[in-house]
Amino acid sequence: MLKFEHVSKVYKGGKRAVSDLSLEFEKGEFICFIGPSGCGKTTTMKMINRLIEPSEGSIYINGVDVLKKDPVQLRREIGYVIQQIGLFPHMTIYENISLVLKLLKWPEEKRRARAKELLTLVDMTADYLGKYPHELSGGQQQRVGVLRALAADQPLILMDEPFGALDPITRDSLQEEFKKLQKKLNKTIVFVTHDMDEALKLGDRIVIMRDGQLVQCDTPDDILRNPADEFVEEFIGKDRLVQARPNIQTVEQIMNPHPVTITGDRSLSEAIQLMKQHRVDSLLVVDEQNLLKGYIDVEIIDQKRKKASLVKDVLESEFTVEKDTLVRDTIRKILKKGMKYVPVVDHDQHLVGIVTRASLVDIVYDSIWGEEQQGEMTWLQSYNF
Amino acid sequence: MATVLQFLSTYGNELLLKTWEHLLISIIASLLGILVAVPLGIALTRFPKGAGTVMGTLGIIQTFPSFAILAFFIPIVGVGKIPAIIALFFYSVLPILRNTYIGVTGVKRSLLEAGRGMGMTGWERIRYVEVPLAIPVIMAGIRLSTVYLIGWATLAAYIGAGGLGDYIFSGLNLFQAKFIIAGAVPVTILALLTDLLLGRIETWVTPKGMRKMKEAA
Ligand SMILES: Nc1ncnc2c1ncn2[C@@H]1O[C@H](COP(=O)(O)OP(=O)(O)OP(=O)(O)O)[C@@H](O)[C@H]1O
Ligand SMILES: [Mg+2]
C-alpha cells in the first residue's frame, strides 16, 4: 500500500533530515513513527503527501509514484491531521468537516449527510454542526480534526502528533476511541508521536528513527522483546521493559517444566498415591511418547472409581497452550476460564510443562518487587485482575 | 440659528449637490483603491522579498504633500474630477495595501498547512482561508483610508473637482467664515457617518466564528 524506497531529504543549507529510508506497509496497518525531536518524523510524513519533496528516492502509494501525481489531487486522496489541529476558526464544524468534500465538488445535501454521519462516529450529536471551533473543548476539536481527515473516506491518513496537546485523560480515551475507529474503518494510518506509550498502544508496527535514519521497524511486541540496540532500549525505557516483560515473555520462559504426570495404563489407586506424594490434586495424563492425553483429578476419581480402575478410562480432555504463546494471553485465558493451571505443549501436543496460578503470581510478584520498586503496579491494572 | 437657516434656504440645494459630489469622488477613489490594493496586497504576500520594496516606495509617495500630488497630475490629466479621483486613489492604496499584506501574512501557518494538506489549490486557499481570516484587518484599512479620503477630497476642489472644498476655498478667498463652516461641517459629518457605516460593515463581514471568538476573549 505504502512504500518508501531509499528516500532521503536534504534541506536547503545541507541539513540531512532523512537518509536512505526504505519501508513497506500493508493496507490497514497502523504505523507509528517515533523518535527524538528533530529526527525527521514530520519530514518523512510530509513527503508522503508532497508537502515536502524528497531529494532522493521514491514513495509509492498502491504502486504509483507520488511524484508522478498532481500534488493537489494526491492530497485530496490522503487524509491529513496536522500537529496543531488546525481547524478553521471562521468556519462552523460542519464547514470544517466537509471542506474537503466541497473541494471535491460534492453537492450540499450529501456533504451535510456525510458530516452528520461522521460526527456519530465519535459520539457527537448533530447539534455541533453549527458551532464554531472555539466553542468546543480541546478533545472535541481534536475529534473534529480527525473527522475532517476522514471525510472523503480516504484510505490513507497521515497524523502528526494529533493528541499531543491534550491532557492525559482525554488523550487516553481518544487513543482508545481512535484505535477502535481505525479497526472498524480499515484505514492505513501513519501516525507520528514522541510518546512511546502511545506508539505501543496504537501501533501495529512502530518505526523508530534517529538522526534521519531508520533504527527499527517492528511490532510493539517485537520491539519490547528484541530492542535493536541500546538506543532503542533507552528510548523504550527500562521501566517499560520491566513492565512489559509479562507481555512479551512466552509461556515456555515461565512454565514449570516438571509437571506431575501419569500414564493411562496405571490404576486409579496408583494415581491417588502419586497425588498424595506430590501434594497435588490433579495429574496430567500422557502416553509413552509424552503426548498429552488429558487429566484426572481427585473429584473425577471420587466419582468414577466404582465403575473403572484404569486412568485412561476416566481421564478428561484438557485445554492447553502452546509453549510460544505470550504469557499475557495465557493469563487472560486462565483468568477467564477460571482454571487453576494450564498444561503447556509443543506444536505436536507433547507435554513440556505447566503454568499454574502460583507461577503467575510469581511473575506478578517479580515485576512488582523483583526489580526496582516503582511504577510496576500499573501492569497489574492493565489486566483487570 | 437664523443665519444658518438663511444660508440653507439660499444654498441648500447647492450644498446637497456639493456633498453628493464630495462623497462620490471619495467613494470612487476608495473603490478603485480597494480594487487595486487588495489583490496587490495578496500578490505581495507571495513575494515577501519584493513586498518590502513596494511598500517602502508607496510609503514615500504617501509622504508627498497632497497639493504637490494634485498639482503633479494637472499637466498629465488636466483638471476636473478625473485627476482628483486619480490623485485620491493613490492615497487610498497604501493603507489598504498594508493592511491586506499584514492581514494575510498574519494568518497562522498551521491553518495554511491544513489547507494545503487537504488539497487546496492556491486560489482555494486565498478564497477559503486567507481572505476570510484577513478580512477584519483588510476592512480596518479600507475604513481608515476612506475616512481620510473624505478629508483629502476637500483639496480636490483646488483642481476643479468640485465637492465641499469649493465652499472652503471660496470662504478662504472671500474671508467669509460662513462658507468655510458650510464646507467644513458637512465634511466632518460625512467623515463621521462613513466611519460609523464602515465600522458596521466591518463587523458584518467578519466571519461569525471570529466575531464570537473576540467576544469570548
Ligand atoms: N524547512 C527546513 N529547512 C531546514 N531544515 C529543516 C526544515 N524543516 C526541518 N528541518 C530540520 O530537519 C530535521 C528534521 O525535522 P523534522 O521536523 O522532520 O523533525 P521531527 O522528527 O518531526 O521533530 P519533532 O519531534 O520535534 O517534531 C531537524 O533537524 C530540523 O531542524
Ligand atoms: Mg515533527
Image (spheres, coloured by chain):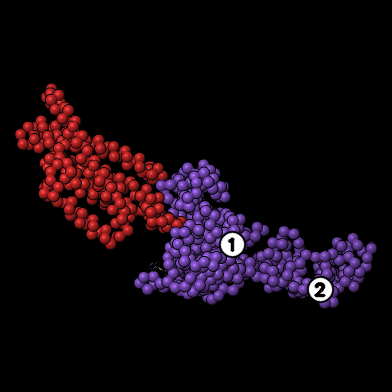
Chain colours: A purple, B red
Instruction: Please provide percent x and percent y for residue A26.
Output: 58, 66
Chain under label 2? A
What amino acid is found at the position of numbered circle 2 in the picture?
A: Leu
Which mark is on residue A291?
2
Query: In the picture, residue A290 is in which quadrant?
Result: bottom right
Q: Secondary structure at mark 2?
A: loop
What amino acid is found at the position of numbered circle 1 in the picture?
A: Gly
- Above or below, comparing residue B163 to residue A303 in the picture: above
The residue drawn where x is 56% and y is 73% is: A227
Residue count near mark 2 (Cα–Cα under 10 Å), binned few <14, some 14–19, many ≥20: some
* Residue B36 appears in the picture as rendered: yes
Q: Secondary structure at mark 1?
A: loop
| Mark before the other along the chain sequence, 1 or 2 | 1
Q: Toward the viewer: A345 or A192?
A: A192
The residue drawn where x is 72% and y is 71% is: A323
Residue A226 appears left or right of A41: right
Instruction: Please provide percent x and percent y for residue A100.
Output: 47, 52
Q: Quadrant of the N terminus of chain A?
A: bottom right
Residue A236 appears left or right of A9: right
Mark 1 CB lies closer than 8 A to ligand 2: no
The residue drawn where x is 50% and y is 55% is: A149
| Furthest residue toward right | A307
Per the model, the C-alpha gap separating discs 1 and 2 is 40 Å
Residue A342 appears left or right of A227: right
| Furthest residue toward left | B174
Instruction: Please provide percent x and percent y for residue B45.
Output: 31, 57
Instruction: Please provide percent x and percent y for residue A93.
Output: 47, 47
* Residue A240 appears in the picture as rendered: no
The residue drawn where x is 21% and y is 37% is: B23
| Residue bearing mark 1 | A28
